[in-house]
Amino acid sequence: MSGKPYYAPPPGPPPNDGSQASEDQEEDVENETEASHTRLISDIKDYLLTHGHLLKVVRFETPSRVPAVGVNVSCRPTPFPRRLFQHAMDLQPAMNELYIRAASDDEWLHSVLRPQIEGEPDGLVASLWDVWVKCREVGVVQEEVTLRQVEMNTFSVAGACHAEGVAGMHRWLMQREAAEMDDIKPLPHLGDLPADTNTSAIVSGLSTAHKLYQSQHPNDHSKCILMVVQPLNFNIADERPIEYGLFACYRCEWRDVLNRCHVGPSRELLYQPPASGKRKASKMFEVSVVYYRAGYDMEEYNSDGVKTRSMLELSRAIKCPGVKMHMVGMKSVQRALAEPGVVERFLPEARQAGEVQRTFLPMLPLDSSRQGLEARRLALDPETAVDYVLKPNLEGGGHNVFRADIPAYLSGIPEEEWERYILMRLITPPTNAEPGILLTSEEVYEGPVVSELGVLGFAMWRSMTPGNGRKDGGGEVEILENEAVGWTFKTKPRSVDEMSVVKGYGCFDCPLLT
Amino acid sequence: MSGKPYYAPPPGPPPNDGSQASEDQEEDVENETEASHTRLISDIKDYLLTHGHLLKVVRFETPSRVPAVGVNVSCRPTPFPRRLFQHAMDLQPAMNELYIRAASDDEWLHSVLRPQIEGEPDGLVASLWDVWVKCREVGVVQEEVTLRQVEMNTFSVAGACHAEGVAGMHRWLMQREAAEMDDIKPLPHLGDLPADTNTSAIVSGLSTAHKLYQSQHPNDHSKCILMVVQPLNFNIADERPIEYGLFACYRCEWRDVLNRCHVGPSRELLYQPPASGKRKASKMFEVSVVYYRAGYDMEEYNSDGVKTRSMLELSRAIKCPGVKMHMVGMKSVQRALAEPGVVERFLPEARQAGEVQRTFLPMLPLDSSRQGLEARRLALDPETAVDYVLKPNLEGGGHNVFRADIPAYLSGIPEEEWERYILMRLITPPTNAEPGILLTSEEVYEGPVVSELGVLGFAMWRSMTPGNGRKDGGGEVEILENEAVGWTFKTKPRSVDEMSVVKGYGCFDCPLLT
């Protein structure tokens, strides 16, 4: 999660500040609903500030200061069916397994990604595939660990720390509200707010991997976890809590990796932090786990970027996640997994294969296959396009084109580039019966809302092929750890298509299980 | 602690942002000192943001957002003699006792404050004294609890939460630095950073008072602590953590107290929070403890303000602190306590009376006494004025006039107002041998620094006079709790006179005990 800050304090005279409502309250004490509203929003603003659930306003950073503003949040927990929440959590291990097995099948993965690799030889997928081929030639030497979500994010999953923080905020608000009720029964709904311990789950997952590495490589080197990060990230409040939870975890900017790291004779990844205090140089650490919070933007893969990724992947450090798990997160792979029979192929023994299959939304390629030609027709016709979203054939969210914008967008780019997108029917999520209240960067929104649940999974596995590095890279895996460890929950105005916190629409929220 | 925000993001094009140093680093990897510096400042900015050690930029608050910036901090713990640190902590209970006993002696207190009460009948001291006289007439009905510092702040002590947070930051930085050292000996200096648990100490103190009240008034009312606060406070990060630590603590703005509170037939103070959620009204709470974070500015004592303070003081709630402990914090009282024999009078049995006496700095009144006339001469002569500071005869810090500014300032106000000030010789604190690095609102300061230690004490006591309300208000007290519970430590550039965090000079810091 990175990009331009969406908040800039307006120049000139200060805007209408939050005190207005407070003064109204003075004039109209009887209006308790208004007072309740004012109080709630003021409490939330302060809670976000005092708990560090903030985004940097990097544009206004000075040498000694960086301003920050709260993340978007929902002012009330939004109702969500308990059954579906539990189902999503229960399905997560099968989801993890599906992606692990798909990522371990080189032949299948290459067949899915081939159009992208060959169609865009300088593109992100081709770069990642090249890194993988190089690793395969040298031989794979390490386990992998990953953290992922139902929505197929396998790489640099953001939002986990904010989600936990906002869930905590809703617990605090509800606890207090309960204490103000006249009836004796304490905390009536607190059990309906699921607990969220994302940060400690990620910390614990990375620690587990770190300990595994330490036990496998008992040498004199001090070990550390390396968090590879983007520069000038305004969303550090979603990264730093993970670092604070680990004893030896260093942030290294993507562009500094080649300067600060090198690979030793046993393919150990060595990292030297900048000096601190009065010492001339820090000691060297051996990296146990590479935790990627950078390396997902095409712009990061110039020649140095490719070298960076290759060095990290070729090392014996545990990658979270490795390059193949990164590639398996591409939309084209998701589309291929959704095709009939594929889930069953990768999960022959899982009793949940059918249920996993049913969670996939149909996606259409925009290539020259029969299916692709049909998709092109749907996308170019304004009458049918309104039910679809056009997504770049990459991993992660963003850069989507919605509904009526699709025909003009496609017409504006060369036809040979259409293959880089997939077409997906927009789901029509149920609107909540009650209007929500959302604090966005622009306004206090009150009106109909829709929500989105994400599940955070943790898995660790190793290749079971001889020498731990079969030349074709495929084959059996042993899954060491596999569980659902947390969730994120976001809510947006009904009328907005994109659930983007970065763009200022989506708001962190907590489900109120019904 | 309140006032105008001292940070406003500049309008127009963004300033030179923090990335500059980062780019330099890229070009010049060998300069590890520079890299170390950049890393330290970046780490500190992020730590403050993610831990909520921030000030609101209230001027730029919008209905849905309020920007915030980090508090001023020192980048390195500043050396401070362990012996003096321990001495200050050891002396705190005697200090507490001195102020409790002085506050309990009406006759003495009135003789000290009379010039202010009579000289400025509409002033703050006169208003507070009137409140006290009213309470005395009705009869005192409750214990008092207070939190205070060596510097004679007995009311609304600010900075405790930030101090704890910044101490934690320095522990984290030092822990990590230690881990990067080549030698095995772990955490070499961590024992030299004293622990700071101010927030939990304040929470624990308020809870103790709350429980005492509950045990004395076992009725069916739910009890709560009422934190009386100023509106639009940019420093909520120094208040909210106390609220979060308590189960039932409500913030009520000074100007809302008369609307939200009333006194019941047994002089119980009743408070109704604004409605929350969908209920039309919250239930009523009985206030166990009034914790003042407002009510120290003269502007707050219009006729409603006086009614507010009177209602709170007349109620049976425990006040933290009561009006007399507020008045005993005035500079004129401090001056009177410093006079020979006074400490011994109030602490006849304390073996530390002499040590307490020695901590007082000589202060001179600017009245028409012989001492006062001598003080006037010193203050008006530019050659002698440079060694002095002119302080308003009030409680707390701020509004000081320094050195060469004094003669012109006094000439600019009517001579009859001079009595409202006291003259104090400026202490010349030892400059630290090593230059400090301070992150202030304006700059990264590097140069000579001086530090100031504050000690946070907690005490609870009750009047021992018959009926718990002797008509003259004076007399014996029983001290129930009395201890030093924490500290604050601030550092400023050597060349700046005022240790004001609000004005952007003073920086929160942690002593490195030597």
Image (tube, coloured by chain):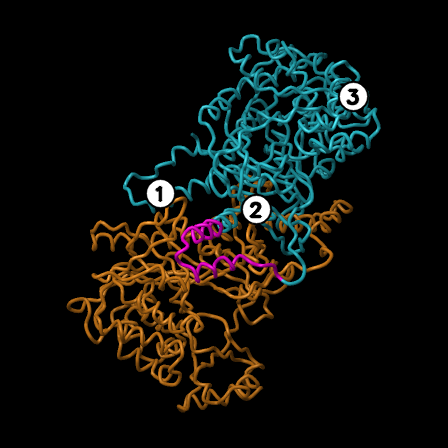
Chain colours: A orange, B cyan
Indicate yes or no whether the magenta region holds residue B182.
no
Left or right for B471, reference A439? right
Crowdedness near tag 3: few (<14), some (14–19) or many (≥20) residues, C-alpha within 10 Å: many
Residue at the spot 53% in from the left edge and 57% down from the top edge: B18
Pinpoint residue B251: horizontal percent, then vertical percent: 63, 39
Crowdedness near tag 1: few (<14), some (14–19) or many (≥20) residues, C-alpha within 10 Å: many
Q: Name above or below for residue B298 compared with residue A460.
A: above
Q: Of the residues shown, which amino acid type is indicated by label 1?
A: Ala
Q: Quadrant of the image for the C terminus of chain B? A: top left
Q: Of the residues shown, which amino acid type is indicated by label 3?
A: Ile
- Disc nearest the viewer among 1 and 3: 1
Q: Which residue in the protein does label 1 denote?
A: B178
Q: Secondary structure at mark 3?
A: helix
The one nearer the camera, B253 or A10, is A10
Residue at the spot 30% in from the left edge and 56% down from the top edge: A287
Q: Identify the mark at residue B54; answer none if there is no mark.
A: 2
Pinpoint residue A177: horizontal percent, then vertical percent: 58, 45
Question: What's the magenta region?
Answer: B14-43
Q: Which residue in the protein does label 3 denote?
A: B117
Left or right for A67, reference A455? right
Q: Secondary structure at mark 1?
A: helix
- Disc nearest the viewer among 1 and 2: 1
Indicate yes or no whether the magenta region holds residue B29.
yes
The residue marked by circle 1 belongs to what chain?
B
Which residue, as the protein is rendered here, is positioned at the far front? Answer: B383
The one nearer the camera, A329 or A180, is A329
